[in-house]
Amino acid sequence: MKKNISRFIQFTKQNFEITLLVFSLILLISLTHSYNSLKNAKKQNVYNIIENIYFKKTLNFYFDNLSPKYQNINHKITQGETLDKILFNYKVTKKEIKIIKKELAKKNNIQNLKIGLTIEFTIDKSNEKIIKFIFPLSRTKKIQLVKITNKDLFKSKEIIKNLNKKIILKEGIISQSLYKSAIDLDIKPNIIVEFARIYGFEVDFQRDIRKNDIYQIVYEVYEDEEGNIYESGNILYANLILSGQPNQLYYFDQKNNEGHFDINGKSIQKALMKTPINGARLSSSFGMRKHPISGFNKMHRGTDFAAPMNTPIMASGNGVITKAKWCGGGGNCIKIKHNSKYSTVYAHMSKFANGIKSGVRVKQGRIIGYVGSTGISTGPHLHYEVIVNGKKVNSQKLKLPSGKILLGKNRKLFEISRIKTDVLISELVISQP
């Protein structure tokens, strides 16, 4: 035995490299086997965890919650809307609407919604139920409803916000467009749209505006206690000076005569606005033309206004929407019947505004949709048609009836109001730094 051991030791010494190699190989095989055994065991453990029903439920829960669970909605109330219609458009169930209305009606009149104010609510997307609802009664008073956990009941709370009315005067020079100039002066977009609507009866914002024309706006804003502008009010005075010629308008709020009037007490409002869009370029007029896509000469029975994508489009007059859908080559289009004589069509929209659908009554100047390039179109623009007694006519040459003129007592009241506004403007000019 000892002799054999001695021989092995002697052999090892004589063949050291071979012995070391064999030993290393054996060690490597052993380690590899151990590693693979451990790896397979870990794989099996992971598989067992994944197949565990509780783990699956936990995993599904977290994946489900990767997408936003709650949807916050702010809806500005417009002419002719009801609470039922607003909530139904956001897919709130009839049962939920009934519960909310019942809670609100306990102490408040919810029949007459305040145009221009905003309804705020939050929807739990997992069950399509409202968990929070804020209903405006006025600019300063709201009712807040908060869902009681696991119950179809709400806890009601009154919110009163102290707002201060402030009158602002802005003056600007148009270098590129009215909209850009006004934005540079920090004028809110809704005031710019309202300013364009007021003058939309008389002014073609594409052809009548010149570089260095001047505008003045005096309007109301409502600030909270920290001085933050909460919302804007009426435009009290407007002046668009075109080629040196002033066009002054005064706001008059007498019952049944509310609106903007010129210095002679004549209403600016007519049956239809001259252009239903602000900051657009007349790209194709009414008449014969070579169609940009088909290449054939064809009668163009409308007016095209080129404008940036999603520029707001306004209803050019009061009326009822008779069509709001896909119109083939016209893309997304809207038709409004204003009265027995006038109708208008708006085509190639990118989308419709909230609450716009067939049967809805709209007020002149309301935003009904946004500029797009849907249907047969070479680029973003509005195709606008005016139909008089069933016949399409040139909107740019249409002679519309003049606005009403204030007479008698109303005229005297207007003159008093106008003088007060002029005094206010003088005070604002003097107070400016």
Image: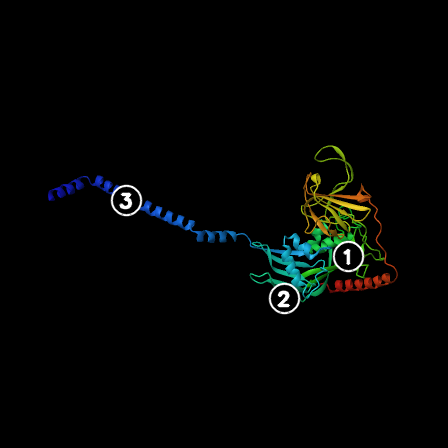
Tag 1 residue: 238
Please report the residue visible at 37 percent of the width from the left and 47 percent of the height from the top.
Answer: 44
Tag 3 residue: 30
Q: Is residue 136 visible?
A: yes
Q: Position of residue 103 (x, y in %)?
A: 65, 63
**Gap between marks 3 and 1 measured at Cα:** 92 Å
Please state if 363 lies on the left or on the right of 227 as rendered. Answer: right
Up-down: is 37 above or below 410?
Answer: above
Judge by depth and name the residue closer to the eye, 270 or 147. Answer: 147
Split into 4 quadrants, where in the image is the C terminus? bottom right
Among the 4 quarters of the image, the one containing residue 187: bottom right
Q: Mark 1 or mark 2: which is in front?
A: 2
Q: Position of residue 36 (x, y in %)?
A: 33, 45
Please state if 86 lies on the left or on the right of 69 as rendered. Answer: right
Tag 2 residue: 157
Farthest top residue in view: 296
* Marks 3 and 1, the one that precedes in the sequence: 3
Q: Which class describes the residues within 10 Å of circle 3: few (<14), some (14-19), or many (20+)? A: few
* Marks 3 and 2, the one that precedes in the sequence: 3
Please report the residue visible at 41 percent of the width from the left and 51 percent of the height from the top.
Answer: 49
Please report the residue visible at 19 percent of the width from the left and 39 percent of the height from the top.
Answer: 15
Up-down: is 212 above or below 218?
Answer: above
Q: Secondary structure at mark 3?
A: helix
**Gap between marks 3 and 2 measured at Cα:** 74 Å
Judge by depth and name the residue closer to the eye, 361 or 172. Answer: 361
Judge by depth and name the residue closer to the eye, 156 or 220. Answer: 156
Q: Mark 3 or mark 1: which is in front?
A: 3
**Residue type beneath disc 1:** Ala
Among the 4 quarters of the image, the one containing residue 20: top left
Q: Position of residue 41 (x, y in %)?
A: 35, 48
Q: Is residue 186 visible?
A: no
